[in-house]
Image (cartoon, rainbow, N blue to C red):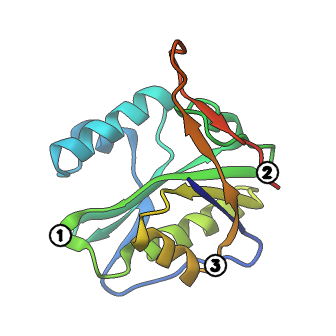
Amino acid sequence: MKVFRQHTSNCQFVQRPDAAFRKISEPEIERGFDAPVDVYQRQSQRLARFGRSYCYGAFVEGSLAAFAWLLPHDVMKLDTPRILRGNPGQAEMTAAETLPEFRGRNLYGYVIRNLFAVGRDSGIDTVFFKTFPENAAALRSFEKIGATYIGTTYVLHVPGMTAPVAWPRRFV
């Protein structure tokens, strides 16, 4: 997976006339926020693993259009497989997704830019994020926002081990 970094000191909230950005509450995730079943199930599992919502989303005409999770350093360790490690003042953006009917509207970039501003306001100075090398849409978005590519991590499934191994997991 390709790993990127964004410092948050200069990140500002972005406004759009056609979308609203806000945190998604635990009850909204539990209700499924009118998302497709597979999206709801993945987010419900994340909520159960992390114990609370770290999810933020873009809503278009009241419907969830795109979202991402911002995991503080002490919560990053709860994600599986554990690919990145963080220090105080760092976070990981994960599970960023635009629902199919809203793709092509730059909502992904809108969400992640605002997520970085949330991080800044929460005392987070660095956000890490990762994607598969073949995810061209995410790579274009990361390039547009000026994210810094900092390396590649590999997830290995070793015979006889129950959990995958990620190497390396610490980036500067």
Check disc 2 and give the amino acid type: Gly
Secondary structure state at the residue bearing disc 3: loop
Query: Which mark identifies residue 101?
Result: 1
13 left or right of 104 in image? right
**Image vertical order of residue 89 relative to residue 161, above or below:** below
Compare marks 2 and 3 and give the one earlier in the sequence.
Answer: 3
How far across and how far down the image is residue 168, in percent?
72, 42
Dividing the image into 4 quarters, which one contains the C terminus?
bottom right
Tell me the mark number nearer the camera, choosing from 2 and 3: 2
How far across and how far down the image is residue 111, in percent?
46, 69
**What crowding class fits label 2: few (fewer than 14 Cα within 10 Å), some (14-19), or many (20 or more)?**
some
Tell me the mark number nearer the camera, choosing from 1 and 3: 1
Query: Which mark identifies residue 12?
Result: 3
Check disc 3 and give the amino acid type: Gln
| Residue that lies at the very extreme toward the bottom in this rendered image | 17
**Image vertical order of residue 33 relative to residue 140, above or below:** above
Query: Which mark identifies residue 78?
Result: none
Whether residue 103 is visible: yes
**Image vertical order of residue 2 relative to residue 140, above or below:** above
- Calculate the distance from the C-alpha at mark 2 to the C-alpha at mark 3: 18 Å
Secondary structure state at the residue bearing disc 1: helix
156 left or right of 27 in image? right
44 left or right of 1 in image? left
Residue lying at 68% horizontally and 39% vertically, measured from the top left? 167
Residue lying at 16% horizontally and 49% vertically, measured from the top left? 36
Q: Of residues 104 and 27, which is closer to you in this image?
A: 104
Check disc 1 and give the amino acid type: Glu
Report which quarter residue 42 is drawn in: top left
- Calculate the distance from the C-alpha at mark 1 to the C-alpha at mark 2: 35 Å
How far across and how far down the image is residue 95, in percent?
44, 51
Query: Which mark identifies residue 89?
Result: 2
**What crowding class fits label 1: few (fewer than 14 Cα within 10 Å), some (14-19), or many (20 or more)?**
few
